[in-house]
């Protein structure tokens, strides 16, 4: 139908039908044409007719992909029936037109012809959604936009692709037919709703073809691989390789595209082979009393995959070892059974063993497989005899004695038995450990007697026990020995008198309180110790005059000072203490009381306190000696420093040591020379007055000596200048030298003071000989080496 100008209500139905028929005729005779949806007629309640707009649903346009036609290729024509009355412009928008990817679809703005400009790829974009527009020349919208859907029709232009080039799977050996193995998968980029993307699988080949060429099959739609034949045996074939083909077009070999992949199926091991011993009987031997010793290696074979639970063997002794003296662990590397002794075996009791051993795997055999006869073997073990050590019985041996037993008393007999009943051997006894050296043993019969008095209070006694170790040795080959311990429990007797405790106490000169609590020390045990009786001795007489002793109880007493003040010092108070033994023992011991001056806390502050704290008289004397030695060393050092300063003052020169000519001569930048370089003729350094007149006038002059002109007047220093004018004198001399016209413009020796004829030092401006003067030959300076080259240049030139 189309859109027309305003018509009467009678003509409207006929006009719509006319446009429909024309439109249908156009579609059948020309390029497909799409008309914009116009108005339809609606009858209102008052009987009048009115046009209303309604939208049409345009069917999708199908375009095959990979078209080889000429481009642009016309698809459909879009027009409005209003183009009869005015000029219209058509356009399309959307992805593929004016949005990326742009330029795929174009429209003729005048005719409305929609065209495609290039081949389409469904795998890239499967459909396009465009919108068509119609406007007048002024850009005003004439019709509402309509939606156009363009579907790309799929072509079979993609081969199937497997998700992996090699698929790996596994299946247990002995699996029944129909057992699932694995699934292979391929994908096709073509439309899966068409035959182009519908795949079918099949097996092209199987390697190896044993025991059958068709051990597996594949579901042609899902790609599931299953077994179809029995006889999978890992011990014969460990893996199979299948070539799988996937074809699209539902597997049509003529039109479909195909691809292949490799499938590797590994046959996994199950315990279908029992371990079998390599021989029926094994032999071994071991010495008696040895443990953790391997007697024999039991070997088996197992066809299952090595180092798996189906291959690893477990050994079990089923007969011949009722006491559990053997065990058979497995070597994880070789799978051998290691028959090992775990409990000592006595040759005198059992000389041989006949063991029955069974081998199994860590996992049970599969159903239907039973242990063969070869899984059981016999092991013959022979026990070898050894010379065993004698054994003391009982060990240790205990006995109870009273302390104080005299030396030479026979205590007991401690003997050992030789386990080797089939050998005639002699046993000798000796003592190994006797810390107090109280006992001895008869080497032949083992009788033990004392060689000293047994004392329970000895430091070697621990909890009233004294242990002595003896050794018994036989005369076998090689000799063997065993040890035994004798434990002696010593009971107490009253053999120790009590002593006052503590032996030393402190007290202030004016004690507050003036009482000291004491007790007694007795090494004996009750009833040979407390309760004790305390009493002050009668002598010396001043003890009872200064002190009183009161018994507090059976263990403690209190010592008090009778007087209010006691001078500082060390006092010894004799106290007699008696124990409560059956035969009581008394002893008078001296309590050392240190009386000292105390501070307000009651603590000693004098030297006695320091001594009591652990610093004895010897230590104090040693400290004093060290202090005296240190003071002497300091005094000697001070005396040495003073003497050294005096020597320096006595030897100090009038000129600075750096200006000494001899020192300046020695300063060179090269090593060499020595004491010989310092052998100078000092006679040339003489007083000017002592020089001969002709020597003064015609004497040889140094090249750096100033010319002989009228001497500039330099300041004279007084004979006894004040120390304060030394600086002024030096500055005046320097000023005079600067104003001297005869002074050279280079460094030279300047005369600051001339002390006259009485001076012992001569002029240093030139060196003259005291004897020959002009006849002096300085050419020999050139032979002294590079050190004296400067002197040779200065004096070797003669009068020049």
Image: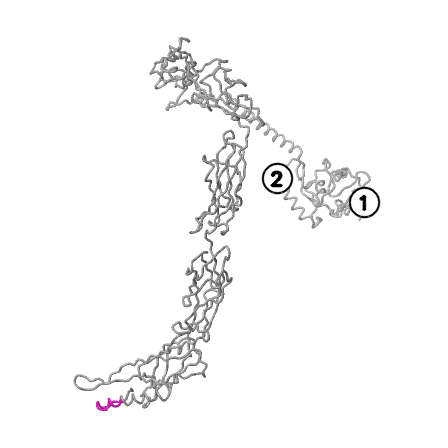
Magenta residue check for 13 = yes
Q: Is residue 133 left or right of residue 234?
A: left
Query: Closer to the camera, 233 or 404?
Result: 233
Describe the element under mark 2 as helix, strand or loop: helix
In this view, 37 is above or below 525: below
* Residue beneath the point at 51% across and 62% down: 208
What percent of the width, then of the height, locates residue 153?
40, 77
Q: Which residue is mark 1?
A: 779
Q: Locate residue 273, reporting x and y percent.
A: 48, 50
- Identify the main secondary structure in magenta: loop
Seen as rendered, the residue at the extreme left is 46
Mark whose residue sits in front, 2 or 1: 1
Q: Secondary structure at mark 1?
A: helix
Magenta stretch: give its range. Answer: 5-15
Residue 230 picture location, percent across and down: 45, 59
Nearer to the camera, 331 or 562: 331
Q: Is residue 494 left or right of residue 437?
A: left
Farthest residue toward the right? Answer: 775
> How far apart are the alpha carbons under marks 2 and 1?
45 Å
Q: Which residue is mark 2?
A: 725
Which residue is drawn at the image coordinates 44% and 75% (left, top)? 156
Where, by quadrant of the figure, is residue 147 drawn? bottom left
């Amino acid at each position: 139908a189309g859109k027309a100008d305003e018509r009467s209500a009678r003509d409207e139905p006929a006009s719509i039908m006319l446009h429909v028929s024309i439109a249908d005729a156009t579609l059948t005779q020309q390029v497909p044409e799409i008309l914009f949806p116009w108005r339809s007629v609606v009858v209102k309640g008052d009987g009048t007719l009115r046009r209303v707009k309604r939208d049409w649903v345009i069917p999708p346009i199908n375009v095959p992909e990979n078209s080889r036609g000429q481009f642009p290729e016309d698809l459909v024509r879009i027009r409005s029936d209003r183009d009869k009355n005015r000029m219209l412009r058509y356009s399309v928008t959307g992805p593929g037109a004016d949005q990326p990817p742009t330029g795929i679809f174009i429209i003729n703005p005048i005719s409305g012809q929609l065209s495609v400009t290039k081949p389409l790829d469904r795998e890239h974009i499967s459909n396009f959604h465009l919108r068509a527009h119609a406007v007048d020349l002024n850009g005003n919208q004439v019709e509402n936009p309509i939606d156009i859907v363009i579907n790309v029709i799929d072509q079979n232009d993609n081969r199937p692709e497997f998700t992996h080039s090699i698929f790996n799977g596994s299946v247990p050996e002995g699996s029944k037919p129909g057992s699932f193995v694995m699934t292979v998968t391929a994908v096709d980029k073509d439309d899966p709703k068409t035959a182009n993307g519908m795949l079918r699988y099949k097996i092209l080949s199987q390697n190896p073809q044993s025991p059958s060429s068709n051990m597996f099959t594949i579901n042609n739609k899902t790609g599931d691989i299953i077994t179809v034949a029995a006889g999978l045996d890992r011990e014969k074939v460990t893996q199979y390789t299948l070539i799988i083909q996937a074809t699209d077009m539902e597997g049509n070999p003529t039109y479909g595209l195909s691809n292949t992949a490799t499938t590797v199926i590994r046959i996994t091991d199950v315990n279908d082979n029992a371990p079998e011993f390599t021989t029926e009987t094994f032999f071994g031997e071991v010495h008696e009393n040895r443990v953790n010793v391997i007697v024999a290696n039991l070997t088996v074979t197992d066809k299952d995959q090595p180092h798996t639970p189906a291959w690893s063997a477990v050994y079990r002794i089923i007969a011949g070892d009722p006491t559990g003296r053997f065990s058979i662990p497995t070597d994880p590397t070789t799978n051998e059974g290691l028959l090992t002794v775990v409990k000592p075996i006595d040759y005198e009791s059992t000389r041989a063993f006949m063991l029955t051993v069974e081998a199994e795997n860590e996992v049970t055999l599969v159903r239907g497989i039973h242990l063969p006869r070869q899984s059981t073997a016999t092991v013959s073990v022979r026990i070898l005899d050894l010379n065993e050590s004698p054994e003391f019985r009982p060990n240790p041996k205990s006995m109870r004695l009273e302390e104080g037993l005299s030396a030479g008393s026979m205590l007991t007999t401690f003997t050992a038995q030789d386990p080797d009943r089939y050998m005639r051997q002699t046993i000798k006894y000796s003592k190994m450990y006797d810390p107090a050296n109280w006992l001895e043993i008869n080497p032949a019969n083992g009788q033990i007697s004392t060689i000293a008095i047994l004392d329970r209070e000895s430091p070697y006694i621990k909890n009233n026990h004294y242990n002595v170790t003896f050794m018994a040795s036989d005369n076998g080959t090689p000799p063997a020995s065993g040890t035994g311990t004798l434990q002696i429990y010593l009971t107490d007797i009253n053999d120790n008198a009590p002593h006052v405790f503590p032996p030393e106490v402190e007290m202030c000169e004016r004690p507050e309180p003036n009482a000291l609590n004491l007790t007694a020390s007795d090494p004996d045990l009750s009833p040979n110790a407390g309760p004790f009786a305390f009493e002050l001795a009668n002598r010396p007489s001043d003890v009872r005059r200064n002190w009183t002793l009161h018994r507090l109880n059976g263990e403690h007493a209190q010592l008090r000072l009778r007087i209010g003040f006691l001078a500082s010092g060390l006092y010894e108070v004799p106290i007699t203490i008696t124990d409560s033994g059956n035969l009581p023992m008394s002893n008078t011991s001296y309590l050392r009381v240190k009386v000292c001056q105390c501070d307000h806390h009651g603590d000693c502050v004098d030297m006695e306190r320091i001594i009591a704290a652990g610093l004895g008289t010897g230590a104090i004397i040693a400290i004093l000696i060290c202090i005296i030695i240190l003071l002497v060393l300091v005094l000697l050092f001070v005396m040495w420093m003073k003497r050294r300063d005096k020597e320096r003052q006595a030897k100090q020169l009038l000129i600075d040591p750096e200006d000494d000519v001899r020192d300046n001569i020695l300063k060179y930048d090269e090593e060499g020379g020595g004491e010989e370089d310092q052998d100078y003729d000092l006679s040339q350094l003489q007083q000017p007055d002592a020089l001969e007149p002709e020597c003064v006038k015609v004497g040889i002059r140094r090249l750096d000596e100033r010319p002989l002109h009228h001497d500039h007047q330099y300041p004279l220093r007084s004979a006894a200048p004040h120390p304060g004018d030394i600086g002024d004198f030096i500055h005046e001399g320097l000023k005079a030298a600067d104003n001297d016209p005869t002074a050279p413009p280079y460094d030279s020796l300047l005369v600051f003071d001339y002390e006259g004829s009485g001076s012992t030092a001569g002029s240093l401006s030139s060196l003259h000989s005291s004897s020959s003067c002009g006849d002096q030959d300085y050419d020999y300076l050139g032979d002294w080496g590079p050190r004296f080259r400067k002197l040779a240049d200065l004096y070797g030139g003669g009068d020049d």
